[in-house]
């Protein structure tokens, strides 16, 4: 076989391979009986909790309702003692109109919190309130707060709220925590009363 003939055969094989590979997608797309797939729909079961998004430092967390019902959503934030140590969790949800409180908040703080010293919240410099602890379980101690319109408005206007708890090891010293209000207004507007 001459060198010229070998080069022609090689050129022919390369051209044939090029034509086949360039036409494969078109051939496979045109072939009948092939499934191109369908995006999987997310189907949540009633009672399932999911993250619906976030606004600033606030998460919008929802519970899937029964078919035909709206999902119940709240806003939530972890509160840190320092950069790497979460110490508390707060969730806020709106109440139905006609109540004295327009919203409710649940705050979970650690076990070994001194329960005789009430939980303190500074919504603003002029709006500081104390709340009793409701109960403790294996997860921590819970404070259930009713929020009036002025409390929510103070949070909308502020950049942070100060929270205070006391540890049983040092009853005379409060532990001050910072609740970020970045994104609070946007997150609060997203949720509906329930």
Image: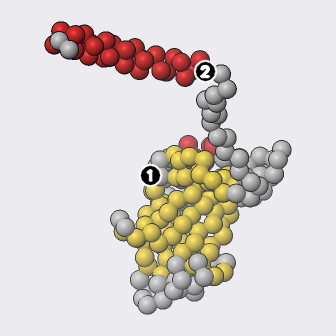
Looking at the image, is 177 positioned above or below residue 39?
Answer: below
- Which element type, helix, strand or loop, lies under badge 1? loop
Which residue is rendered at x = 57% and y = 79% of the image?
140
Which residue is rendered at x = 16% and y = 13% of the image?
3
| Disc nearer the start of the sequence (1/2) | 2
Viewer-side residue, 119 vs 193: 193
Image location (x, y in percent) of residue 171 = 46, 88
Q: Which mark is residue 159?
A: 1
Looking at the image, is 40 positioned above or below residue 116?
Answer: above
Q: Residues within 10 Å of mark 1 (few under 14, many from 20)?
A: some
Q: Tell me if I can see residue 77 in this picture.
A: yes
Residue placed under numbered mark 2 in the picture: 31
Q: Tell me if I can see residue 147 in this picture.
A: no
Q: Give yes or no for contact between labels 1 and 2 (Cβ–Cβ under 8 Å).
A: no
Image location (x, y in percent) of residue 193 = 73, 50
Looking at the image, is 86 positioned above or below residue 47?
Answer: below
Q: How far separated are the C-alphas under marks 1 and 2?
A: 60 Å
Viewer-side residue, 14 vs 67: 14
For residue 75, side relative to residue 14 (left or right): right
User: In front: mark 1 or mark 2?
Assistant: 2
Rendered image quadrant of residue 15: top left
Which residue is rendered at x = 37% and y = 67% of the image?
84
């Amino acid at each position: 076989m001459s060198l010229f003939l070998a080069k022609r055969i090689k050129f022919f094989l390369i051209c044939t391979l090029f034509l086949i590979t360039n036409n494969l997608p078109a051939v496979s797309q045109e072939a009948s009986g092939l499934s191109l797939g369908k995006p999987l729909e997310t189907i949540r079961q009633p009672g399932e909790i999911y993250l619906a998004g976030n606004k600033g430092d606030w998460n919008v967390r929802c519970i899937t309702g029964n078919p035909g019902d709206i999902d119940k959503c709240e806003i939530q934030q972890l509160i840190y003692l320092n950069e790497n140590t979460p110490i508390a969790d707060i969730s806020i949800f709106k109440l139905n109109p006609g109540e004295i409180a327009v919203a409710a908040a649940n705050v979970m703080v650690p076990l070994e919190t001194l329960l005789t010293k009430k939980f303190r919240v500074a919504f603003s410099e002029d709006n500081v309130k104390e709340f009793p602890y409701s109960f403790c379980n294996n997860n921590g101690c819970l404070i259930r707060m009713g929020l009036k319109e002025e409390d929510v408005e103070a949070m909308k206007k502020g950049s942070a709220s100060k929270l205070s708890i006391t540890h049983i090891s040092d009853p005379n010293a409060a532990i001050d925590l910072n609740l970020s209000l970045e994104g609070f207004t946007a997150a609060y507007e997203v949720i509906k009363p329930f």
